Image (tube, rainbow, N blue to C red):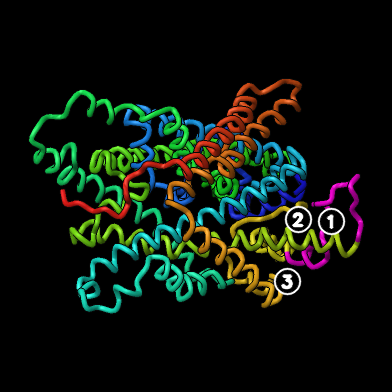
Amino acid sequence: MDSTTLRQRERADLEPLLHEEGNNAGDDDDESHHHHEHTKAKCCSNFSPGSISNLCSATLGAGALSLPYAISMTGIIFGVMFLLLSAYLTIISINIIIEACVVTQQFKFEDVSKRLVGPHMSIALEASLLVFCFGTAVAYIVAVGDILDQGLHSITFLWEPDSKFVSIYSRERVMILFWTVMLLPLSLQTKLKRLEKFSSLGVLSIIFLVIAAVIHSIIHGDVIGSGANSQEEAATSAEVNSLLWPKSFVSMLQAFPIIIFAFSCQVNVCQIYEELKPASSITDTSDDVPNVMTLLKLKQQMMTTITRNGILLCTILYLLIGVFGFLDFTKTTTDDILINYCIQVTHDALMTAATFSVFLAVVVAFPFNILPARVTLKLIFDRLKTKRRRGLCSKATNCFCLDRQPRIDEDTNSQRTSVSLEIDAGTPIQSDARGSSIEPLLDDQFSAQSSASLVEHVLITLLLSGGALIVAILVPGISIVFGLMGGTAASIISFILPGMFAQKMKERNGSTSRVGKIFVWGGLVMGILTTGTTLYGIFNTDSADGNTCTLN
């Protein structure tokens, strides 16, 4: 998007403001100057609280379920340090991404990546987004399986000795049945407007779970609740140390990507930044055209405040559920904290309600991960078909050319982009990065815009949703999914790419970015180490049986 187009777009957004200023053109210079300063202060100090809610919605999720387990591996001291460090690094990476949006005047993470680091890294980003969405869908199915297993076990008459249900029941069969009846039909949907109103359910469910977890830990916990009061002897020094310090260096490496995954939100921040609506803006009085760079800088200041407040809120919630969840169960903490509450045994009303709220949030959120993954996968398939059909690429050229897509994709992406980039006159502004736009698509017009046939749509959905089900059945636990996602896709999206952005922006000024180098090399090293230790943990685990429930 060139600067002229952006000026037209901002002018359309600020038309009421310009009209008001035109009516007051007779004011003297002093009044105009006063109005100018007042407008600047007002723009910088006011923003919709919904922006913080959007950032929290992009951050908070099922990753919180494994944070008590991560604390159990790192100990409370290093666990708290890792959470605070991850929050700090997340704020830095978001600020870098927003600065890149201002410099490039692009407002999609994929477009910023293409403009700064080239098409090859854009392909890596697409692959990371695909893996990230697919892995999140796997984690959601695992969480659904855990919750359904507890729920069915809480129905006592199903488990009577003469019941046929006992002989046919298995967790895997329940997961397959629920996926077939509920998750697959949701995944096939192309009109998600009806579900979009429930998108905030995830944030509310996590907040409710955190409150319930703190209350349960205080009342029933092994350390500060009735569990501690029931112990005959005081805790030994070794037992206290086991709570405060990590089990081993390997366990720390296994826990770190779980925490990184919990803070992953970077891919959404460009859209949140673009959608900011200042109360007013500074205009260029010389030509009566909004000063675009000034407006972008003001929005950047607003986004800095939003980022700081939003990540602070998420960090507080993560600290509460991580520490109190671990203190509740200590050595028996599982990789899904919901399993520990054993609602099928305790019938605790508060924890049952919290578990049910998380269940609803996960079910509603599932198709929102399949849809962008499906769009990404279709773009990749279309590139492969274009290469084979036209034979325009060779080993000496870029075989995944992002500059030219088949006509079928151009129409799709042009229509897709026009949904969010319309001017007052009704003329769509088409993005110049047509092949790399992979935003989460939530609009009603997606089915009309999609050029995929019904058969292709169903096959790609089955590949993604069905593949997620198979992996969810085979994976040992939900923490394995979070660990692999944090060590691979999240490392690229959260650290490596923002670090490259910082380096490229500094290179334009003839200097180097120390922060950028730290992010790139630190993200690369930590990604390799943590992924390796997570894979090691799959085949060398001595964790306790996650299905064992004990009453405190």
Q: How far apart are marks 1 and 3 (CA)?
A: 17 Å
Residue at 41%, 42% in the rendered image: 541
Instruction: Describe residue 296's horizontal placement relative to residue 341 as left or right.
Output: right
* Residue 127 or residue 509, whichever sits in front: 127
Q: Earlier in the sequence, mark 3 or mark 2?
A: 2
The residue tagged 1 is 404
Residue at 68%, 42% in the rendered image: 292
Where's residue 299, x and y in %?
57, 41
Query: Could you tell me if residue 498 is visible in this image?
Result: yes
Q: Main secondary structure of the magenta part?
A: loop
Q: Distance between the residues labelled 3 and 2?
A: 14 Å
- Residue 435: mark in rendering: 2
Where's residue 544, x and y in %?
32, 45
Image: 13 above or below 396: below
Q: Which of marks 1 and 3 is nearer the N terminus?
A: 1
The residue tagged 3 is 451
Crowding near pointer 1: few (<14 within 10 Å), some, many (20+)? some
Crowding near pointer 2: few (<14 within 10 Å), some, many (20+)? many
Query: Are circles 3 and 2 on residues that touch, CB within 8 Å?
Result: no
Query: Are circles 1 and 2 on residues that touch, CB within 8 Å?
Result: yes
Where's residue 399, x and y in %?
84, 51
Crowding near pointer 3: few (<14 within 10 Å), some, many (20+)? some
Q: For the residue marked with disc 1, what is the amino acid? A: Arg
Range shown magenta: 391-412
